[in-house]
Image (tube, rainbow, N blue to C red):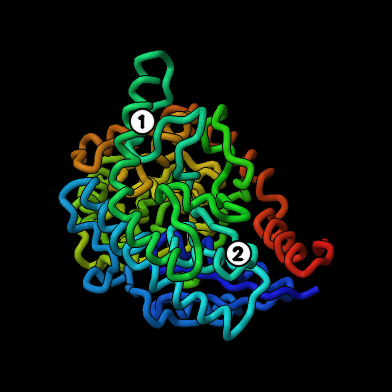
């Protein structure tokens, strides 16, 4: 039985490919899928077989062009400043606009299920107002406080004693306070659509039927406990449509893949230092700059091939190491291939991803200001200490087990069956 799904996403870099991967999977099973998205994403949406639909009043951007980036969090001087941009420019500030556009689309083309990037609270508000099943997609680790894990954001180690637990309580309170400034805009969107105000922004994220975490459960802390509406649906490992063809550097030395953000995060100087580090090691380097950085601007030694993009699914079987900003997509694809990492987090969720990689024993973390010498030392250690590859391969086995079935599609079809009163498809 074919169902109708309305997806909603935004030009959020690494959050886009996993969202569109789910949309593609539903289309391949015969469902009708429309995707509300920034115009800059419409070619990617169309490549999945889904129908792209433009936002009309909600803000739009293009993360491949720093001038058109919606958040411009690379301009923020502090992590709190970067957070404020996310809150005010995407999550809460334009909530009424996202709600208005989503409800207009649902009136024009009714859907059985609304599937939205979890950060679009305005869209989630629209689904609640429309009275249809709503699924939020989390394209990274589950980002809210739960028992068994430190507060999300600062990249803290798990608590092991009373002082660390006190630290967690203090930090948790500190991370909640900045959300309060976004509450008036969010509640204005809710009341405009006949919904009661919420007491906190954080509580609004849980007003969904399902929160699907597109991340390996195996990567998160073993003792972490999650709310009942949260489901780990496993990562999406297919490449974006824009990655291009495979080209490997010549030779038979160990291959090091370098992949920083697909969005602009002031990473060009770091790319130079990583290239310089690889020039001191007996490796071949494949350095991908992403769409936001011109490969010609990176100074690379002779053993490093610099290119804008590369299909990770084809590169990683050849790789001995990945050096990355610890973006969720690159990190998880590397682990799924059994490749250990050196993580150089630049911001956003990357410190949390890097901390999990290190906690699992599958890689090392160095600071974003690390010198070429420090990066080379970390890379050499990961390459020569077999424990890192062993733990990466352990995670690869667990990720393979988690992705043996498409749990995201199964959950969404179950919601659709509930909406129309029929049994889920098998």
Dot 2 lies on which element?
Answer: helix
- Side (left or right) of 56 relative to 47: left
Within 10 Å of disc 1 (Cα), the crowding (few <14, some 14-19, many 20+) is some
As measured in the structure, the alpha-carbon distance from the residue carrying label 2 to the one carrying label 1 is 31 Å
Q: Quadrant of residue 33 in the image? A: bottom right
Dot 1 lies on which element?
Answer: loop
Q: Nearer the viewer, residue 253 or 227?
A: 227
Give the residue drawn at x 48%, y 67%.
Answer: 123
Q: Residue furthest bottom?
A: 108
Percent x, y of residue 61: 32, 73
Residue 389 appears anywhere in the view: no
Residue 41 appears anywhere in the view: yes
Residue at label 2?
22
Give the residue drawn at x 57%, y 55%.
Answer: 208
Give the residue drawn at x 33%, y 62%.
Answer: 185
Q: Is residue 376 above or below residue 222?
A: below
Q: Is residue 223 above or below residue 204?
A: above
- Side (left or right) of 416 relative to 303: right
- Side (left or right) of 260 relative to 225: left
Residue at label 1?
156
Percent x, y of residue 85: 26, 58
Q: Nearer the viewer, residue 185 or 160?
A: 185
Q: Which mark is residue 73?
A: none
Q: Earlier in the sequence, mark 2 or mark 1?
A: 2
Q: Quadrant of residue 30 in the image? A: bottom right
Which image quarter holds the N terminus?
A: bottom right
Q: Is residue 58 above or below residue 383?
A: below
- Tell me, yes or no, whether the two marked residues, 2 and 1, touch with CB atoms within 8 Å: no
Give the residue drawn at x 59%, y 34%.
Answer: 394
């Amino acid at each position: 039985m074919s169902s109708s799904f309305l997806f909603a996403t935004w030009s959020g870099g690494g959050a886009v490919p996993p969202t569109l991967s789910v949309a593609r999977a539903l289309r391949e099973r015969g469902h009708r899928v429309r995707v509300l998205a920034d115009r800059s994403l419409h070619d990617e949406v169309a490549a999945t077989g889904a129908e792209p639909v433009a936002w009309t009043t909600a803000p739009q951007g293009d993360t491949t062009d720093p001038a058109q980036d919606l958040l411009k969090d690379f301009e923020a001087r502090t992590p709190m400043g970067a957070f404020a941009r996310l809150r005010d420019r995407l999550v809460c500030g334009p909530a009424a606009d996202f709600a208005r556009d989503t409800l207009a689309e649902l009136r024009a083309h009714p859907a059985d299920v609304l599937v939205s990037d979890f950060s679009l609270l305005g869209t989630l508000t629209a689904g609640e107002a429309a009275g249809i099943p709503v699924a939020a997609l989390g394209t990274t680790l589950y980002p809210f406080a739960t028992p068994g894990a430190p507060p999300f954001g600062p990249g803290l180690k798990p608590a092991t004693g009373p002082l660390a637990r006190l630290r967690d309580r203090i930090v948790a309170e500190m991370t909640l306070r900045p959300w309060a400034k976004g509450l008036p805009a969010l509640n204005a969107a809710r009341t405009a659509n006949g919904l009661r105000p919420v007491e906190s922004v954080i509580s609004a994220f849980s007003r969904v039927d399902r929160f699907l975490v597109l991340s390996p459960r195996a990567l998160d802390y073993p003792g972490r406990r999650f709310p009942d509406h949260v489901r780990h649906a496993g990562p999406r490992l297919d490449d974006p449509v824009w990655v291009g063809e495979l080209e490997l550097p010549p030779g038979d030395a160990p291959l090091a893949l370098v992949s920083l953000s697909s969005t602009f995060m002031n990473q060009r100087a770091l790319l130079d230092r990583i290239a310089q580090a690889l020039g001191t090691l007996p490796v071949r380097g494949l350095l991908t700059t992403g769409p936001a950085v011109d490969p010609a601007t990176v100074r690379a030694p002779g053993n490093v091939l610099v290119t804008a993009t590369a299909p990770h699914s084809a590169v990683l079987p050849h790789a001995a190491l990945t050096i990355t900003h610890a973006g969720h997509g690159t990190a998880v694809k590397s682990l799924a291939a059994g490749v250990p990492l050196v993580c150089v987090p630049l911001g956003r969720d990357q410190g949390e991803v890097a901390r999990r990689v290190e906690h699992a024993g599958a890689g090392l973390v160095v600071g974003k200001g690390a010198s070429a010498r420090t990066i080379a030392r970390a890379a050499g250690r990961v390459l020569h200490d077999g424990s890192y590859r062993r733990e990466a391969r352990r995670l690869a086995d667990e990720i393979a087990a988690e992705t043996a079935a498409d749990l995201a599609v199964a959950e969404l079809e179950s919601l659709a069956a509930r909406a129309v009163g029929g049994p889920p498809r098998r």
